[in-house]
Structures are given as C-alpha cells and as structure tokens.
Image (tube, rainbow, N blue to C red):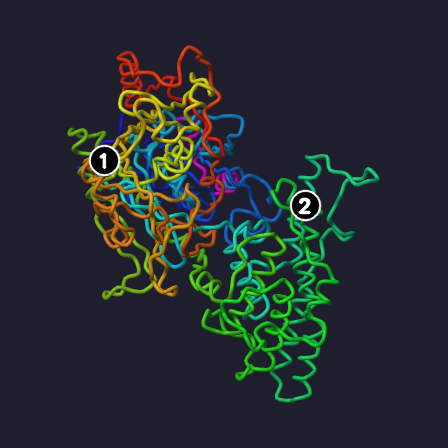
Amino acid sequence: MATMTAVGAPQPPPTSSCPPILRGIQAALGHDLLTEILSCRILLVGSGGIGCELLKNLALSGFRHVEVIDLDTIDVSNLNRQFLFRSQHVGMPKCVVASEAALKMVPPLNYLHNTLPQADTDASATQSENAGATYIPHHGNIFDNTKFNVPYIQKFALVLNALDNVAARRQVNRLCLAASIPLIEAGTAGYLGQVTVIDKSSNTECYECQTKPTQKVYPICTIRSTPSQPVHCIVWAKELYKLLFGPKVEESMLFEDEESLRAESESAAADEQEDGATTDNGNKTSTMNGEGGEKSTYMDLVLQVRTLLLQARSDQFETRLSSWSGLRLLGPKLLYALFGTEINKQIDMGRYKTADKVPSPITWEDMESATAEPFISPTQWGEYQPTDIWTKDDCSAEIIACLLDAVQTHDDPNFPLPEFDKDCDMAMRFVTAASNLRSYVFQIEPIQSVYSAKGIAGNIIPAIATTNAIVAGLQVLQCFHILKAQLAMQNASGGEEQQTRNLKEVCRYTYCLRDKTRKGYLLQPTTLPDPNPNCFVCRNATVSLALNTNLWTLEMLLSRIIKKELGFAAPTIMVGEDIVYEEGEDIDPAEYASNLVKTLVALPGGGMGHGSSLRIEDFTQDLEVEVIVTHKENFVVKEDEEGGGESKVDNREEIEKFEIGGKKHVVAAAAASASATIDDASKSGSNTDAATPANGTKSDDHSDDDDIEVIEEGGATKGDGYDSKEPAKPSNGGTNGSKSPMRKRSNEDRLENGVKKAKLDSTEVSEEVECVVLEE
C-alpha cells in the first residue's frame, strides 16, 4: 500500500501534465516524494565549484525553495570550472549570480502556482514569474550568528555543504547538530571525493568526530594575484612551467585571452568607479584599450617562446642554434613582463591598496644586469649545492638557463615537455627560481632552496572539476533518501526511533575513488559511521591541552586554541566556578580586558596550572566542553623523512607551541601525558591518551576545486575567507558596568543558562541567543 501524503501537501501533476524532465523522478521515486521535493526548503552553504553543480542538480530535480549562503565574489580564475558564471559576472557575488542562473533551470509548474507554499522572501529573493519557485541568495558570512543561527537552520528540511575550508564546515556542523537538522557533507581533492550524512537524531558521526588537519587549501585568486606564503609562489611557478612547456597552454591558470582580460578590466573599472578613483587630470582611470579589450602583458612573449621551443625540434643544427639565440634574447623580456610590467599593472588597478606590503616589481635595469654576459647560472657554479639560497639575480639567470636547457638537452625532440615532475632537474630548477623571484617581488619569506621547494612542489593536488560534478550528484541522491525517511516518519508512529532507523539504513558514506576496486567500482558506499565517543562536539568528551601556562596569556588561549582550533564563536570561559572571560550582546567589551593580558597561572580563581581544568560554553552553538590543562615547557617536532626524520627542539613562536587531543582524560592521565613525545602522539592518532601535535600533516579530505590543495609541513594557513580570523575581540554589545573582571557563577546565572539551552532545543528561540558576529 502506498505511503499516505502529508496533510495539506499539494498533489503532483498527473504524468501527462508533469514536465518531461521530472517524469523520470516521478516514476522512480513516486508521487509522494516528488511532492515533498516540490515543497520542501533546502539550504545550500557555498556556491563555488561543488555549489554550482549542486544548484544545477537541485533545480533540474524539481527543488523549488532553495536558499544559498556564500561570502565570495566571482574571480576570473573561477570561469573555467564554475559553469554558472560568465565573464560579465566577474566581481559580483557568487550566490546571487548562481541563484539567478539555477532558477532559470527549474521546470515550470504553472498549475501549482497558487497551491505550493511560498518561501519567506526578502529584497534579494529571485522568483520565477510563472512557477512560484524561489531561490534566495545571502551574500554573507556563515559565522554571522545574528542571521545564520539555530532558529534559521530549523526552517529547512536539510542542509547541503559545498564549502572549501575546515572552519566554515565546523560552524555548519555545529549549527545543524544544535538544530537537529540533517547535513549532507561533501568534499573533493583531485580525483578523490566523498559524501556523507550527519544527523544528530540518527546517531551518526559528525564532521568533527575525526581530527581535522591544518588547512592546506589556497584560493586560485590568491595564487594569481595576492600571494603571501612561499607555497603560493611555488604553485604559481608550476603554472608558469605549464604555460611555457605544457601540451596545452590554455590549461594553465596563467593563460590569458581577450575575454578574461576584458572581464578583469571591467571588474577593476567598476571598483574604481565605486571608490571614486581618478587620475591627476580628473578623468576616471581605465585599464581598457581603445578596442574594448586589453592586451596581455606577457602572453605574446609566451607564445613566441613556445614557437622557438617548437622550432628547436628540428634536426638542423642551424635551426636549433637560431632557437637558442632567440630564447637568449627573448627570455629577459619575458621575465620583465611577468615580474615587472604585470606587477605594475596590478598596482595601477588598485589590487594592493589594502595590502600590508606593496609588491616591488623588478626593473629592466635589474633584468639586464642579471642576464648580462658572461652569463653563468647559479647551478653552473663549481660549488653549487641544492640547499643554496639564490639571490634575485641568481633566480633570473637560472630561469633563462632552463629555457636554454630545454633546447640543448632535449634528447627526445617532442616538444612540449612532459608534465611537471619533481624528479626532473630542469623542472625543479625552473620552479624554484620562478617561485623565489616572485617571493622577492612580493617580499615573502623564507626564500626556498631547490631542496626545500622540491618537498612542497611534489605534494600539490590539482583540481579536477569532474570530481565536483560526481559528488554533487551523490549529494542530491542523499537528499532523496533523507526526504523519503522524513516523509515516512511523518506518516508512521515511532518518532525518534523511526527516524534513526530510516537514516541509518538508507543513507551511505560514499567514497569517490581514483582507482577501481577489485570488483571494478569507482564509487564505494559504506555504512554511516557511529559517533566518536571522544568527540567533544557531539559527545561532550573532555579535551586535553598541553602548553606553557607560565607564558601563555588568556588572549593567546582564546584566539589560537578556543576560537581557531576548537571553533568556538562566542565563548564563556570558566575556571572552577569563576568566569574569567565571556562574550555576548549584554557584555561590556572592557569587562574582561584586564584578564586577557594575564598569563594563565595568574588568572583569578587560582589560575590555570598543571592538572587544572576549565569549562568553555557557547550557547550560539549549543556547545560545552571541559579542557584539562597540562603544563609543558619543552616541545619537540619531528622532521619529515627527507629531512632525516629526526626530532628537534621546537623553535616556533610560543603561540604555536601546544598539543591538543580529544581523549577523555582524568587529571592524572593528563599529567602523565606531559612527558609524552610528539612522536608517540603521531603514531597513536586521535585515539591515544597522549596529546596530538597541533600542526598535523595529514591533508584535509574536504576541499573544493576552487582551490589548490597542498600537502605540506607547517602551521595554519589562510583559506578562502572563512578560516582566517582576527585575534579574538569581545563582542560590541550592550554595557554592563556592574560586573567585575572575575565573578562567581551564581545560581541565577546557571538558571539563565539553562533557560537559554532549553530555548535552543525548541523551534522558537528568542533573540537572546542571537548575540555575536565573529569578526573576520
């Protein structure tokens, strides 16, 4: 017997009147589920690589009420993989453009115009005139708790994640757990990808049940225009290698054509018009030429270099010699275009108006001096070592030498050269020299040797757009499973038990593999894993923390550990019964300012010493955790295998010296872990009693093709805008000058907090909990 349709739900059309594109869904899923698809509300967080694919899938599957949250704007580098965007959209919010494009794909259902429930709309809502479908973009930050909080999440049937950084995923994970709304999480890294379902009432593993590594994903726009780390320059240099030597010049992110240049110029012109930028004569500045397009500063020279390399395939000595001579003359001009003219162009466009350091382009005089005769590259020196650090002139000379080597030592005259290989001597010399020269221009330290650059360049995962399309399709399939389970729960008795059984049985954790399984499959579905009993987010486990309590201040603990590592948005910190720090709309920012500068051992209430515990609460996330503190003064780090694998003293700044773990400790166990080494922790993983290193080297398994992922050693890095936070600051809420920096937690406080928690568990939450916007 067919499942009864929910009372009041609109009936789907008969097959004869159903749009052809939905007839397959109706035949496969049934009338009831199609009705649910047509009427339910879906939230999508992120509208980049995976997000574009998801919006297309949702629209063509009949989902008519979708809201999209994204902070990012469209960059020229997005156009080759985020297919909902065009060159005229550069500089516009991704969520707005993507919502408009996806809405046009929604199949029209005129007969339901007056019967389908209308979604809440605002000034930015995009509605279909003939069908009543509504796709609402929100150009904002998911960390804005005044807008995107638990009551907001509870309005949706489910949430889809299409994010590209760990911090934003943590926030969505916690909001969905607090609201008891299913979350479909997905991520890609090259050919690999995975999709899973997170649901609190179904007792599934949450996003934070497994230890997440330090973020190693970098936006392409950062690589192209605003590098700030050596790895950014190395990724750029590999793209330059692809541009000069690769089989298809258009595959490099540095490739420029008239369309992309025109889009970038129009975006810059719009920014200048908005800022009121003028030249000295009062006219608006413009980077456009008279023909409406813009001439690239380096592409003509790139094509000339590739032509000379092609000519070098000739068996005629004279032709090869002519190519060699041409490259010798053309090489310095190309370098000046890349590292001088192009940088000056970006400066004139106002690209670095807010940068901490303005780039210092190379001059033609610098290039002439570096490549003058007698011409000797640094690798031709008699005492050359792979660990040498090259000067700016050395880098210029080495790049020219690599171009000449491509002619002289090309045994197989089949240009283009093979793909980049870190074991190819010429390729590594070229990438090292080009990345270092870019580091000199952008004043980035440290400058890399060939040896150190090889370790980074060999671990860069390329973006595969097709993987995004696959995981987005898998996410929509999980949508169908969840909606079917929710529909069955509405029409059957059993309540929570029924929902738990349904989601556990029908949803899967699916891996997208690069190599086939023994049975020939590239998709590997598995049962949704159970929660990690040591997860402090969904299982309230205790967290162990080892650091130097004599040197760490409360402000360091707040910004580096509590907000950045543990992901709290508006924390209240208690030592015993004493509140030493609190954020909220009714809290005076100056109230706890005196505590922020104190060391942990000097805090009120006896301080945080060895074996002490503190409690952290965040009612915006419905989250509480107990932290066991272990005093530790001496830290060691283990080098990678190429560096010998030896342990050495940790010489990083104090704020990076800590060990954090998720095992449920007693004080005695925490004290014993003070003597545990990082080597022991790294062997045991997240389920060890010893604390784990803060800067894990394992790559994030949830990235996105908008970015380039790098597996490397090192500390935290900036992501795409969500995971880069300023040092913690109290919220600028109301004042309450009657409180002292330290006060006992009274029974009234506990009662008030209990009321807040009860409100978070209900569908109607007061404005009390909508209190903090995390400053980015």
Between marks 1 and 2 in the image, the one whose residue lies nearer the viewer: 1
- State yes or no: residue 106 in magenta: yes
Q: Name the residue under label 2.
A: 266
Q: Residue at x 31, y 42 (%)?
A: 632
Describe the element under mark 1 as helix, strand or loop.
Answer: loop
- Image spot of residue 548 (x, y percent): 34, 39
Q: Nearer the viewer, residue 221 or 510?
A: 221
Describe the element under mark 2 as helix, strand or loop.
Answer: helix
- Image spot of residue 739 (x, y percent): 40, 13
- State yes or no: residue 538 in magenta: no
Question: How many residues crowd mark 1 within 10 Å: few (<14), some (14–19), many (20+)?
Answer: many
Q: Which of 257 and 623 is in front in this view?
A: 623
Q: Mark 1 points at which residue?
A: 541
Q: Quadrant of the N terminus?
A: top left
Residues drawn in magenta:
99-117
Q: In this view, does 3 lie to the left or right of 431?
A: left
- Image spot of residue 643 (x, y percent): 39, 64
- Image spot of residue 415 (x, y percent): 56, 77
